[in-house]
Image (tube, rainbow, N blue to C red):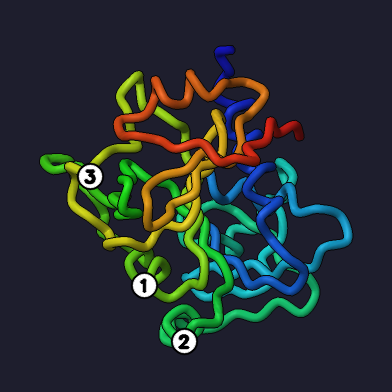
Amino acid sequence: MELDKKTTREYIAKRVAQEFRDGYVVNLGIGLPTLVANYVPEGMDVVFQSENGIIGVGAAPEAGKEDKDMINAGGGFVTVLPGAQFFDSATSFGIIRGGHVDATVLGALQVDKKGNLANWMVPGKMVPGMGGAMDLVVGAKEVIVAMEHTSKGAVKILDECTLPLTAVGVVDLIITEKGVIKVTPEGLVITEVSPYSSIEDIKASTGTELKVADDVKILTL
């Protein structure tokens, strides 16, 4: 089933939010991951951190209610929750490098079967730099890649990344509009299939061998 861009992004964000637990400190990367803050299950206390110096980030503001001084690391408008704090980059990266982030959610250009991540540049194209990604993927306790399964038909989950790496062997979970794939020492394992896909579709859209978990689930949101 072909999904439009909006439905695809919303589905991925909703599914990512189900990975959180009460009391988690979570960092959301730029782009699609920022949507995750809108779908935290009701009653769950999750603290969102932005590496430009905020802890206690809330959902995106309503149109027309943006505060020009309240932005995330990608320059997008955010809200803050009661008790939020603002601080400098040294403190922010101290939180990240100190192991105080329970999960980080990032987009990716490529991920491979060993959990290697490429998400910061395409050779020959202008890039602003790696940002906080390199610190986040080694400092956070869990690394979740949230991305569309393919890019204009090109596979993004591979035997081996061909683009410059952000970090080696850091990805724990890949969540796309087609399903959930866990990175294990034995390779990549499909643990959930979205209602918009199938095991056959996921395998056909992936550039490496995929195992299927014995208890694989069909997920509905």
Most extreme residue toward the right, as rendered?
A: 43
Label 2: state its secondary structure: loop
Answer with mark 1 or mark 3, whichever residue precedes in sequence: 1
Mark 3 and 2 residues: CB-CB less than 8 Å, in contact?
Answer: no
Residue 158: percent from the left, percent from the top? 29, 38
Residue depicted at x 51% and y 36%: 212
Whether residue 30 is visible here, answered yes or no, is no
CA distance for labels 1 and 2 = 10 Å
Most extreme residue toward the left, as rendered?
A: 124
**How many labels sit on residues?**
3
- The type of residue carrying mark 2 is Gly
Q: Position of 198 compared to 123: left or right? A: right
Q: Position of 150 compared to 80: left or right? A: left
Q: Name the quarter where the C terminus is drawn.
A: top right
Q: Name the quarter where the N terminus is drawn.
A: top right
Identify the residue position indicated by label 3 in the image: 161
Label 3: state its secondary structure: loop
> Is 149 drawn above or below residue 165 in the view shown?
above
Front-lying residue, 198 or 94? 198
Identify the residue position indicated by label 2 in the image: 98
> Is 197 drawn above or below residue 90 in the view shown?
above
- The type of residue carrying mark 3 is Cys
CA distance for labels 1 and 3 = 19 Å
- The type of residue carrying mark 1 is Asp
Answer with mark 1 or mark 2, whichever residue precedes in sequence: 2
Q: Nearer the viewer, mark 1 or mark 3?
A: 3
Identify the residue position indicated by label 1 in the image: 135
Question: Image quadrant of residue 102?
Answer: bottom right
Residue 91: percent from the left, percent from the top? 48, 87
Q: Nearer the viewer, mark 3 or mark 2?
A: 3
Front-lying residue, 176 or 192? 192
